């Protein structure tokens, strides 16, 4: 079931071309248009971790801003949980972490979360417990009484994650949740996102850190210059692109290897094992068949997939 | 409603953690206290001078707080992008804006109350000192504080200060309008521009009745000319008239304050016109409605 749907979503920004002042005279001409998002059609299913990927300026943040009601789409429509954007009941079931978030810096950590709890209409006792729980979850219990003004970039990101979970949301929108975090922090966020899925929540997040996305996403969409390049399960996007097979054989002699040598990409012998790189599925199957018939043993067979990064680069280059 | 209250209280918190507020407040208190000392230099009408000076000081500083704290309130939320997460919460933009408004109004009103208490203590101090057997400085100050507190609760408790609280009430109503303007401008323009707009409107509001009077004069003149030359009156109305007429209608009429102060100082009584009060409320509602209309469909940065 799709919990987030967009249909033909587009956003055109109009920017100032000239904006100068000569003393008291101000000349301003608006005109240059940026198509930040061009006819985006997406469906995100309930309970999945969906990664919105793309290089800088691809339109990831724009998409999320429109979904969150910060910007209005130039055309197209979007629905969250089957309701048009801005629905109050829906808003109380979602959480949102903006890109490079900034919060009320005169509030202490717990005060800030408590205030957001009030906006969700959570009663005082529950709020207390939730604030404590979330501060512990994001590792900020020690900083509960420090004003946000004194938070580091990573702490700010963590408190941002905490506020996105204040209402125990069904869908969480995270715009680059791992930016500003150290490697350990990034792993914590990955685990946190996986934990959310385990609770049946849907996670929609944007990133350009592909290795992280690859580890946790059920499905990804790749945006480039505002256009959707491809969307699907990682296994679907990448399986068709298994590029090579690494075959490790034992108990075969050189004569056997020589029969295949010129059709193989690479051949290496090391400590009685032969490492072969094959570029085709048929060749791989034939070698394994012949080897086992000749009394050889298959020690390992590793299909080498294209990484998301290879795929990403080829997609982006191909446009 | 709960959401508006939460935002208002958070706004109040923001304001009272802002240094500029204390700066203005300390300055105001010093000035009010100084007015007592300065009035000793004059020979006549000492009471009148203290009263009119105090009322004006409270009024101007309350407006200063509304302007200085108010103009950046909404703007900062957009500039620092704190609005992003607020918008994603289950509250309407209009609730956010109203929350900001009431938080600012609360800040201004609390400051008016603080200034008024200082003012009352000072006046009762001078009244106490004027008595021949006042019983020493310490007693006078103690009594002054007590009497100020009593006056604050029961306005007509002492005849010398009976007019103060009603005038303060009018000031609070007036600030309701000024604050609405600060929020309106802040919702679509930069702090510096908002400040200029708000101050301009504050001044124009004070002059509103003069502008109206000016309009009447121009109209009378045009009427005389029309009668003399046998033309229609429209032909005789100058562009100046149209501009003044427009200005008189659009600017808030803050003249009630002036009238009340004059009455309080010179006649020792205050009449609260129900029509003025209703006008204040209606004008405020209209300004806030406009601010909400602008804010509702805005793209944030
Ligand atoms: N407020 C704005 N006004 C004008 N142009 C904008 C605005 N916001 C974004 N853009 C433009 O829209 C395009 C998409 O921007 P967007 O922020 O959505 O990219 P992104 O995918 O989030 O990039 P990043 O990975 O750097 O965060 C960019 O070309 C950007 O310059
Ligand atoms: Mg972005």
Image (cartoon, coloured by chain):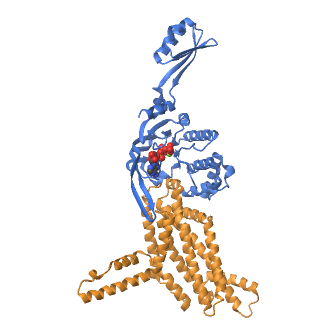
Chain colours: A blue, B orange
Query: Is residue B114 something that shows in the picture?
Result: no
Q: Is residue A228 left or right of residue B269?
A: left
- Picture layout, residue A313 above or below residue B154: above
Residue plotted at (59% across, 63% down): B14
Give the image location of residue A40, x and y in percent.
Answer: 40, 42
Give the residue furthest to the front.
A22
Near-viewer residue (B283 or B223): B223
Query: Is residue A151 something that shows in the picture?
Result: yes
Near-viewer residue (A95 or A160): A160
Near-viewer residue (B219 or A124): B219
Give the image location of residue B27, x and y in percent.
Answer: 63, 74
Q: Is residue A74 left or right of residue B30?
A: left
Occupied quadrant, residue B234: bottom left
- Picture layout, residue A197 above or below residue A23: above
Occupied quadrant, residue A122: bottom right
Counting labels gives: 0
Give the residue furthest to the left.
B230
Residue plotted at (46% across, 80% down): B207
- Picture layout, residue A226 above or below residue A108: above
Give the image location of residue B40, x and y in percent.
Answer: 66, 89
- Picture layout, residue A29 above or below residue B102: above
Residue plotted at (44% across, 58% down): A20
Residue plotted at (73% across, 94% down): B132
């Amino acid at each position: 079931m799709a919990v987030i749907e967009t249909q033909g979503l587009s956003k055109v920004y109009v920017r100032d071309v000239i904006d100068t002042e000569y003393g008291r005279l101000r000349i301003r001409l608006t005109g240059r248009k940026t198509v930040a998002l061009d006819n985006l059609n997406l469906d995100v299913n309930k309970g999945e971790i969906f990664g919105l990927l793309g290089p800088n300026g691809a339109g990831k943040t724009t998409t999320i801003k429109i979904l969150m009601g910060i910007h209005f789409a130039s055309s197209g429509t979007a629905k969250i949980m089957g309701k048009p954007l801005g629905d109050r009941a829906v808003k109380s079931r979602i959480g949102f972490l903006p890109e490079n978030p900034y919060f009320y810096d005169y509030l202490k950590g717990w005060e800030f979360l408590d205030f957001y709890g009030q906006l969700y209409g959570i009663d005082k006792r529950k709020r207390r417990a939730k604030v404590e729980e979330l501060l512990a979850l994001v590792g900020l219990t020690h900083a509960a009484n420090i004003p946000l003004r004194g938070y580091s970039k990573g702490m700010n990101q963590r408190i941002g994650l905490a506020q996105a979970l204040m209402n125990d949301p069904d869908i969480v929108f995270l715009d680059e949740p791992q930016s500003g975090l150290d490697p350990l922090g990034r792993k914590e966020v990955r685990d946190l996102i996986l934990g959310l899925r385990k609770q049946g929540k849907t996670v929609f997040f944007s990133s350009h850190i592909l290795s992280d996305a690859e580890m946790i996403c059920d499905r990804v969409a790749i945006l480039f210059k505002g256009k959707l390049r491809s969307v699907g399960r990682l296994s679907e996007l990448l399986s068709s692109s298994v590029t090579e097979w690494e075959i490790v054989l034992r108990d075969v002699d050189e004569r056997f290897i020589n029969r295949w040598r010129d059709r193989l990409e690479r051949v290496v012998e090391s400590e009685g094992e032969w490492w072969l790189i094959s570029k085709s599925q048929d060749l791989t199957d034939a070698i394994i068949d012949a080897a086992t018939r000749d009394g050889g043993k298959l020690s390992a067979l590793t299909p080498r997939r294209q990484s998301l990064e290879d795929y990403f680069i080829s997609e982006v280059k191909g446009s | 409603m709960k959401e508006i209250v939460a935002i208002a209280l958070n706004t109040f918190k923001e304001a009272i953690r802002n240094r500029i507020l204390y700066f203005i407040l300390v300055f105001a208190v010093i000035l009010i206290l100084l007015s007592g000392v300065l009035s000793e230099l004059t020979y006549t009408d000492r009471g009148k001078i203290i009263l009119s000076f105090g009322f004006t000081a409270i009024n101007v500083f309350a407006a200063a707080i509304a302007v200085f704290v108010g103009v950046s309130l909404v703007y900062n939320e957009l500039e620092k992008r704190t609005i992003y997460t607020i918008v994603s919460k289950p509250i309407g933009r209009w609730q956010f804006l109203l929350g900001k408004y009431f938080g600012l109004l609360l800040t201004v009103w609390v400051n008016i109350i603080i200034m008024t208490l200082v003012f009352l203590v000072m006046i009762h101090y001078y009244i106490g000192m004027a008595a021949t057997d006042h019983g020493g400085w310490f007693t006078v100050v103690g009594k002054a504080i007590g009497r100020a507190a009593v006056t604050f609760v029961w306005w007509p408790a002492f005849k010398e200060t009976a007019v103060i609280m009603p005038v303060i009430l009018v000031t609070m109503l007036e600030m309701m309008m000024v604050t609405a303007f600060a929020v309106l401008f802040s919702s679509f323009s930069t702090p510096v521009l908002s400040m200029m707009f708000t101050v301009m409107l504050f001044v124009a509001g004070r002059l509103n009745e003069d502008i109206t009077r000016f309009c009447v004069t121009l109209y009378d003149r045009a009427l005389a000319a029309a009668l003399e030359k046998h033309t229609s009156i429209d032909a005789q109305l100058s562009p100046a008239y149209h501009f003044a007429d427009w200005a008189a209608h659009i600017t808030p009429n803050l003249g009630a304050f002036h009238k009340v102060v004059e009455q309080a100082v010179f006649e020792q009584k205050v009449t609260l016109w129900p029509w003025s009060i209703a006008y204040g409320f209606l004008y405020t509602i209209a300004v806030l409605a406009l601010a909400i209309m602008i804010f509702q469909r805005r793209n944030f940065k």
